Amino acid sequence: MENRDKVKINQLFSRKKKMYTAAILIILAAVYIVAFLSTPFTIRSSSVSTLETLRRLFIEPLINPEYYSGYLEMIELMLETIAIAYAGVTVATIIAVPVGFLAARNLLGPLSYLAKALLNAIRAIPELIFAIIFVASVGIGPYAGVLAISINSVGMIGKLYAEVIESIDEEPLEAIRASGGNRIQVIWYGVLPQVLPEFVSYSLYRFEIDVRASTVLGIVGAGGIGAPLILATWQRNWEDVGMILIVVVVFVSIIDILSGQIRKRLT
Amino acid sequence: MIEFKDVSLVYPNGFKGLKNINLKIEKGEFVVIVGMSGAGKSTLIRSINRMVQPTSGQLIVNGRDITNLKDRQLRGLRTNVGMIFQSYNIVKRMSVLRNVLAGRLGHTGTLRSILGWFPQSDLQLAMRNLERVGIDSKAYQRASNLSGGQQQRISIARVLTQEPAVILADEPVASLDPPTSHKVMKDLKKVSKEDGLTTIVNLHFIDMAMEYADRIIGLRDGELVFDGPISEVTPETFVEIYGRPIKEDDLLGKDDEPEEVDLEDVVK
């Protein structure tokens, strides 16, 4: 066989493509330089040493029996927080299923972009803003928290659901259509059995996120453990802050582990 | 039963799938369509249940021109014409029995099917059909746990449960190994003869077509180039259909290999 020219491991790029890559690299470098220059790295010294604060945060609440009685109340508040997240993600799942179908390109065609745009808009607004709006409209308390969590979660799981639906095997759908099934039957017997495990898995994952999110909702009065947390930080009551953080860390870890185990078995 | 009157089909990209096909298939016939890939076999079969839309001519199924049926009538037609696919087209995450019941959807109201309230007679029918293709013991297993040949039998049971008058099979054994192919074709022929169904099968292996067909239809470049009972088929017929001499690749091989063994039954 005739010998080829020298074989290069990568395809040779055209001059235009090289220029393009260089331009991108220059822009990226500029962004980094601006970012570093505009961030002040100075540290202002405080009257209290950091070590002392850390000791009051994480050691004192654990070793001083004086604080032990406070945990019960914190755990109660944490359970309320988890309940907010659970109710929120349940409502979100119920709404996200139809929305997900509407946003799936393979079922709805170009119309799906409308639903996708709506979901993107929802996701762009932070939970805290929703929480503030709902506290203003339905009053202080966990109800506002549930509403804020559910709306925000629809934004994410609706989109994930749509992506799951878009990745299904469409051949069984063809079979149901070919046997005289109507549109709803195609969805019920062709699409749903293929997507349900992933739907449940994504809802659980979102529940993990929502538990973490609900812990800060109390800051704006939307219920849960966030209210005492923000109060304690304002008062520099580091022992209480520490107690709350310990409870949050323990519960969030437990939930993450459990939900992770369930998700692993689903698919 | 089925009559093509000057049917042509041009795809949107300009490709001519079918060219002036005239063809009449009687009730209860077992017809095999042969031809090279791209010859229009799938297009012909899929015209009959309007999965593709002929662009001219008339296509009569059960005394009725189906070329212009709308939504509801189209579903009625498809309820009466069952289909088997090359890649089985079953939902792998669903149980075998549920997959078979999916064949009943055309006969079942929307609300009933959503709730899963199939009449007991449908469930009996589904089980009986699973028994006929020899996989009734797997009714409650996930379809993905079954072998390729068994998965194709699920789809045969599904199509039987639909209780159609016509079965269309689009390359039903192209994804299976030779011995399994023969078993599946035997099953298909057996059940279609038992129920007196009109069956139209696409195959690209010549020996297989000769073994199972009552009648052979040859397509080449969208044109009908042969139509007759297998007694009229000569070696030259296939040269004509394929437009070239027959090669080893056009044959599947004899059905003399050992029977497919179900590992689960062996272990028990």
Image: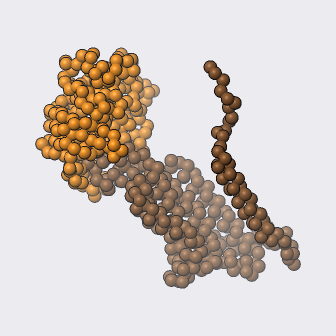
Compared with residue A107, is residue A127 higher up or lower down, i.e. above or below?
below
- Residue A48 position (above or below residue B83): below
Residue B198 in view here:
yes
Q: Is residue A237 above or below residue B208?
A: below
The orange chain is B
- Residue at 33 percent across and 37 percent down: it is B85
What residue do we see at 45% from left, 62% from top?
A: A113
At 86% across and 73% down in the image, what residue appears?
A: A49
Relative placement, left or right, of B198 versus B40 is: left
Position of residue A261 measured from the top left corner of the image (x, y, whole percent): 57, 51
> Residue A107: where, in percent of width, then height?
39, 55
**In the foreground, A35 or A156:** A35
Q: Going by the image, does A197 lie left or right of B239?
A: right
In front: A243, or A236? A236
What percent of the width, then of the height, locates residue A177?
30, 48
Specify whether residue B129 is in view: no
Q: Taking A102 as reference, is B29 left or right?
A: left
Q: Quadrant of residue A31?
A: bottom right
Q: What number of labels is visible?
A: 0
Using the rendered view, name the quadrant where residue A3 is placed.
top right
Horizontal and vertical percent for residue A204?
A: 53, 58
Q: How is the image coloured?
A: by chain
Q: Is residue A209 above or below residue B223?
A: below
* Residue A265 or residue A137, whichever sits in front: A137
Q: Chain A rendered in what hue?
A: brown
User: Which residue is painted at 65% across and 27% down in the image?
Assistant: A4
Question: Residue furthest toward the left?
Answer: B63
Viewer-nearest residue: A71 or A216: A216
